[in-house]
Each structure stands twice: as structure tokens, then as C-alpha cells.
Image (tube, rainbow, N blue to C red):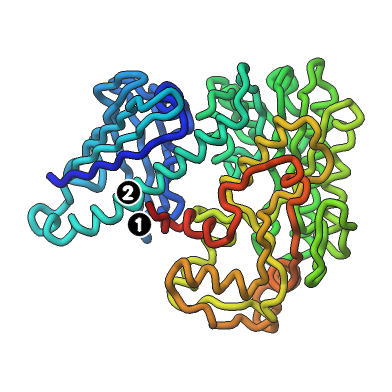
Amino acid sequence: MPVLTRTSLMPAPVDRLAAWHFHAGALDRLLPPWQRVRVESASGGIADGSTVTLRIRQGPLTIRWLARHERVEPGRSFVDRQVKGPFAAWVHEHRFLPHDASRSALEDHVTWRAPGGKVGALLGNRLLEKDLDRMFAWRHRRTASDLRRHQEYSTSDALRVAVSGASGLVGRQLCAFLSTGGHQVRRIVRGHPSAERLDVAWDTRSGVVDLHMLDGVDAVVHLAGENIADGRWSAQRKNAIRDSRVEGTRQIAEALAALPHKPKVLIAASAIGFYGSRGPEPLDESSAAGRGFLPEICMAWEEATRPAEMAGIRVVHLRIGLVMAGAGGVLAKLRTPFSLGLGGPVGSGRQGMSWISLDDLIGAVMHCMRDESLQGPVNAVAPDPRSNAEFGRALGRVMRRPAFAPLPAAVVSMLFGEMGRELLLRGAFVQPKRLIERGFRFEHPRLEQALAFELGKVED
């Protein structure tokens, strides 16, 4: 059977490295964002005989991968063995090795057998080895990044954090990150709450939030709301966006204000759409609001947190830029046309694109939790805004594809209407002034770094 072993030094002692892997959320943090794979179920944590099921999408097909944990030695190692899945056989040993007082070594040792017998092995082993090496290089990079973040914001006490929008692209990864740091996460859910997971029930129609489950949390991160880029902006669609963002935020803020034991901070998602379309003008948190539907929504959205602020809760309006995430959002939508050589500038190509990597957005949330001097607007963007044309060229370089196929403004307007004109043809060059002033460290300060990481193009 083929064998792959990868060993990397980690910026944490061995007990913290092992704890990161044994906490809930670790597997979510280790799923490659360029693959369509998700944790479907898990039972028993990491213990002998416990299982996890992954759902993998390959084109129109759905594959389920059932793995069982074996030879579990807390603090030292554990093994995943495939019970059912895409390989003829798969055994993966995770090893946590001491190095010195502040560092450790992570070693992944994998043996596998390709499907299809001898023919499958002949045709697939080299490709599989290349893909696995790429995946584990990325996994080790993210593990090291998370350990650095947890070290930067570590305290003696774990936090209790409630998160709305926890099933979304950002919320799911934020919850996983917090869990791997030993923090307790309570998901604010609009469906059926799980008592086992300590979910917080939220009935958006009546505005009722389960105050008992929110009472005593240290921080609340409010991410829930309609996706503004999901379809054309009809009058009905605009009302749905406004209601979900503004009314939803007001409900959460009023619930927090009514708690006997209030959280120290509410971090409420906003957007750099606050600034509108401003041409080449550099913008920061002191800049005035723009004009149009998005700035109006953002202003009302931020104003809706007032009940929490009036109750003495520190409120941060996190004005989020375009999130670079291989598993969703704008980057996931651009991968297919760019891989086909059909990428290029949209409209004039001069409009600003202010962005942030998914991991830096999660880090910014953590920074705002810990830094008690931060309140009011905070721009969650990288210090490297680009024009649309520059963004396309950078993505083309990372993907090793040409990026000169234009998408004319008239076509954008015809296909997407007002939504396309606002989101694709207009933009702003926004700077993270307050994060920089407060010493925030960007894991991906440059666009090419963020794109390479999310698309699995990391180098040793």
C-alpha cells in the first residue's frame, strides 16, 4: 500500500496541539475549501469506536465516507480507519510529538489503497499522492495558523460565545475555530434547537429569543441575514434583505438588553457597502456613508444595535469586505470561469475590491472580543485593496490561467439588474485603519497569499 508521511513544527507545546485536534470543530477546520466536502455526522468525539461521516460531492454524485477512530491515546495520537468510502482501504494516523517547551511536531501518516484494483492503482496512485500531499500541506498550514491565533488571544478562562448565522460560510468556521480553542459555543438557531449543543432558540417571526440560554454568555457574534448577492433585487427581495438585516439585528439587540447578566460585547456584522461607490478615494472608519440601497441598509443595520448599546453592552460594527473563501462566496463563483480561461475585468475594471481572507475575518472577530477599546465601526478588510482588473489578474496568476476575457457593464446590467450594478460595477478602496492601530496581525495581508491558501496552492 502507498504511504504518505508529512511532519511539521507547530507553534505550540504538544498538549495544546493535541487538544486542538481533540476539541469539537477540528475536522471542520481541516476540510479543504477547494473540495466539496462536509461533516454530515459525528458520534462520540474522538474515542475508540467513535465515528464520523463526511459527505463529498463529485460533480452530480454524492459520496459518503464513514471513518472509525481507533488506537486513541489522548495527548499523543489517534487513528482514522475507513469503514466505507471512496478508497479500497484507508488508514490515517495523527501523531503529536513533543519538540521543546513552546513547540511540537504534527505528523500525519497515511496508507491507502486506490479503488479499482491493480488498474486503479496504476492509474491513480500518483495523482492521489499529489492531491494528498497538497491537502496535508494546507492542513498543517491552517493548524499552525489557528494555534498562533489561540496563543495570541489566550486567557486563563474560556469564553462562552453565542453566534447567529452559525450554519453559514463564516459562522460555521468561526464556531469551529472557537471550539478548537476550548471556548463554549452556543448557536442561535431559527430552526430546531439542540439541547445537547446548548443551542439558543430564535423565532424571527415573533421576535422571541430564548433568554435563558443567552444569559451569562461573554460575547455575542451576530452574522445572520439574507444574502444580498442571492438573486436580482426586486422590490420584494429588497424588503426581505432589509427585514432580515435590520429587524433581525434589532431583535437580537433587544434580547441582549433584557438579560439579567449581559454579555460584555456584541459584534454585529455590517458591510463595507456602508461607504457606497467612491471611485479611487481611500476610505477608513471615519469616512461618511455613501448613497444608495446598500449604504442605507448598512446604516439602518448598525442603528438597530442601539438597544444593546443603551444597555451598556460594548457594540462593534464589523464592516466586512469581500470574503476570500474557497468553499463559498465570490471566490467559489469565480473558480469555474477562471479555470476555463474566461476570467477577466468586469465593466471598467477600475472599481475597488476590498477583501479579507476567511481566517483573518475570524481572527478579527476574536480581536474585537478581546480588545475592550474597540467599539463602533471596524473595517474587516485586508490592507491590500485592489481594482477589479488587478483582482482578476491576481486570481489568474494563482490559478495559472489567462484573465483577459471582459464582462461588459451592459451584460452585467442585463443579467443581474440593480444587484449586479451595485455589487459588480461599483466598489470602494477601504482600509482597516482601526485593526492596524490596535495591533491586529493579518495572516494573509496580500491578495495572492489569500487566494493561494484558499485554492490549495500553498508551498512548503
Q: Are marks 1 and 2 in contact (CB under 8 Å)?
A: yes
User: What is the CA distance from the residue labelled 1 to the residue labelled 2?
Assistant: 8 Å
Which residue is at 38% across, 45% downward? 55
Compared to 177, does 215 lie above or below?
Answer: above
* The disc label shown at residue 269, or none: none
* The disc label shown at residue 58, or none: 1
Can residue 428 be seen here? yes
Residue 135 falls left or right of residue 416: left
Q: Nearer the viewer, residue 6 or 356?
A: 6
Q: Which image quadrant is residue 339 in? A: bottom left
The extreme front residue here reads 100
Q: Picture coordinates of residue 420 (x, y %)?
A: 70, 71
Q: Picture coordinates of residue 103 (x, y %)?
A: 42, 29
Which residue is at 42% across, 38% downward? 40
Q: Picture coordinates of residue 294 (x, y %)?
A: 80, 60
* Residue linked to disc 2: 63
Which residue is at 74% across, 18% downward? 215
